[in-house]
Image (cartoon, rainbow, N blue to C red):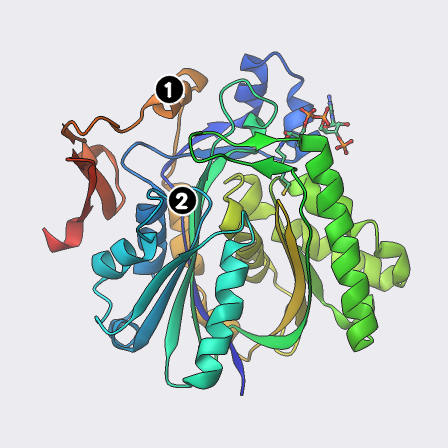
Amino acid sequence: MEIGIDKIGFYTPNTYVDMVKLAEARNVDPAKYTIGIGQEKMAVAPVTQDAVTLAANAALQILDEEDLEKIDLVIFGTESGIDNSKAGAVYVHDLLGIQPHARAIEVKQACYGATAGIQMAKGHIALNPESRVLVLGTDISRYGIGTAGEVTQGAGAVAMVISTKPRILVLENESAYLTSEVMDFWRPIYSETAFVDGKYSNEQYIAFFLNVWEQYKAKYGATLADFEAICFHLPYTKMGMKALREILDQGSQADRERLVAHYQTSTSYNKIVGNIYTGSLYLSLLSLLELSDDLKAGDKIGLFSYGSGAVGEFFAGRLQEGFREALAIAEHKALFADRKELTVEEYEAVFSQTLPTDGSTVTLDIAADPAVICVAGMEDNKRLYINKTNE
Ligand code: COA
């Protein structure tokens, strides 16, 4: 049975900071941010957007009536969730109007969450071929103003419909994965911002990649020549290249040129959004599929997922006939074109805005946020969500 990605939606808030201006404000050579790290713009989430609304906005774009009737599992992958008990998937299920006889859960393992969701979705569909599963990777990445990680912040969500006979990518069953207890990045329950041992994290990312790649090759006899492109989890766009170049000498000159060229295309969206944690690998896939003009049906795309802490996985998919027609290229172009630049001062002010934690009531200005689904306020320690199309 062929199971895979039938639809991919993406959403990012409509405000961003330019990395050259951020570098100047931090007294850093802009080339460090734009070349050394590889980021051009960083999405900034207003207080009216959180992991729930970003995910719901990403899914809203792709779901039709048939999806709403057939989706019976919603998996919400995040590491910036809004509740330690209730799954963000339950809110998304309600905001989108998915039929009630569905399971709705949240999964967590740093940036690996959406990949875990996809693998669980495949198992569910193998047992229930008529089902469709909505997998969400949604996050706001926050390290803090003036920290070394600040340049790798971002905000956004990717929503994927997983089904049989997928129109975009059939996911192959071959996969190699690894878990090992490492403290490279973590966020204790009491902290709004992440703790990271940046250099160690980079080392672990590469070590995990090499481990699962070698495992995958040994298990399935794979070589670089099998892959038209390899997409990476991208906390920042230089990171995937550091991993890719570790294995390039295993291929021919043609392999190297093809993989490097496709890698560059796969980083275009991430460069202007920043780190969206769980969704980053799938944003990179989206960038590759929407911006490449030489991909064709049957091409094999490798996917490396990494969630600090850590879990890594290497797996692959095959592009389907007519995959381009199943993408929302024009919508994503418009989403980027409509964004508004914030000054560094404006970004710092937005970053510092938080919702009350003392049970008080607050009403937010949702008219200032063009998103269809927003956080409208808070009351009695409950977030009040709104889908403007239902008003
Ligand atoms: N021009 C061009 N490149 C420059 C430069 C300049 N003027 N100044 C520095 N650079 C390069 C450095 O050589 C380095 O490149 P390299 O990594 O290829 O060696 C890169 O810019 C970063 O410089 P560095 O001094 O290492 O930056 P840093 O100490 O500020 O930390 C991170 C960078 C990425 C470690 C930090 O931002 C971080 O911790 N981010 C979060 C980590 C993360 O996301 N981990 C999760 C992995 S999943």
Query: Could you say which is closer to the camera, residue 318 or residue 305?
Result: 305
Residue 360 locus on image (x, y percent): 16, 27
Which of pointers 2 and 1 lies earlier in the amino acid sequence?
2
Identity of the amino acid at label 1? Glu
Q: Residue at x 74, y 54 (%)?
A: 209
Query: Could you say which is closer to the camera, residue 337 or residue 342?
Result: 342
Q: Residue at x 89, y 61 (%)?
A: 250
Quarter of the render that holds ligand 1: top right
Identity of the amino acid at label 2? Thr
Q: Residue at x 57, y 57 (%)?
A: 291
Instruction: List the residue tagged with mark 1.
Output: 346
Instruction: List the residue tagged with mark 2.
Output: 12
Residue 240 locus on image (x, y percent): 70, 47
Residue 162 located left or right of residue 311: left
The 10 Å Cα crowd at callout 1, few under 14, some 14 to 19, many 20 or more, is few
Q: Is residue 84 above or below residue 15?
A: below
